[in-house]
Image (spheres, helix red, strand yellow):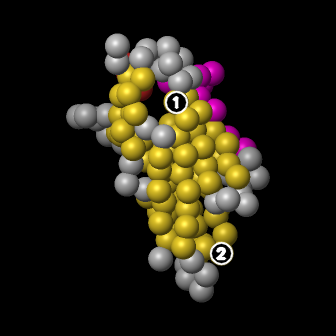
Amino acid sequence: QVQLVESGGGLVQPGGSLRLSCAASGNIFRIYAMGWYRQAPGKQRELVAAITRGGSTDFADSVKGRFTISRDNAKNTVYLQMSSLEPEDTAVYYCNAEIAPIASTTSRYWGRGTQVTVSS
């Protein structure tokens, strides 16, 4: 059983910062790509940032220069550091990871999401 658990969401004023964390646990052999998606009310879920096991990163144009993504492979954890937050960043943020469980096939897993609200 593999689980992804996000933490770190909350309410922040425009221009503020938040750091999201996502820890994977369970019967894990290896974690490949990890990433963060978000879904605002009435909109489709979109990719925010992704990072390979080797550390290569990719970002949505809307967050480039404001967000950074990192991971700790020893802790099976991925982080999203968000700065200069804007009201348009308000959404539920979901962690996603490509995981190879022990004695099972590689699959994509999702966390339950954490709410980020940017408002004064």
In this rendering, is residue 77 above or below 60?
A: below
Residue occupying image coordinates x 66% and y 69% = 30
Question: Which portion, as a residue range, is magenta?
Answer: 56-68
The disc at residue 107 is: none
Residue occupying image coordinates x 60% and y 43% = 79
Mark earlier in primary sequence (2, 1): 1
* SS category of the residue bearing label 1: strand
Residue occupying image coordinates x 61% and y 49% = 78
Q: Amino acid at mark 2?
A: Phe
Residue under pointer 2: 29
Residue under pointer 1: 18
Q: Nearer the viewer, residue 56 or 120?
A: 120
Residue 120 visible in the shown view: yes
In this rendering, is residue 82 above or below 13?
A: below
> Within 10 angstroms of label 1, few (less than 14), some, or many (20 or more) residues?
some
Q: Nearer the viewer, residue 49 or 15?
A: 15
> Within 10 angstroms of label 2, few (less than 14), some, or many (20 or more) residues?
few
The spot of residue 14 in percent (x, y) is 43, 15
What is the C-alpha distance between the residues marked 2 and 1? 30 Å
* Residue 3 belongs to magenta span: no
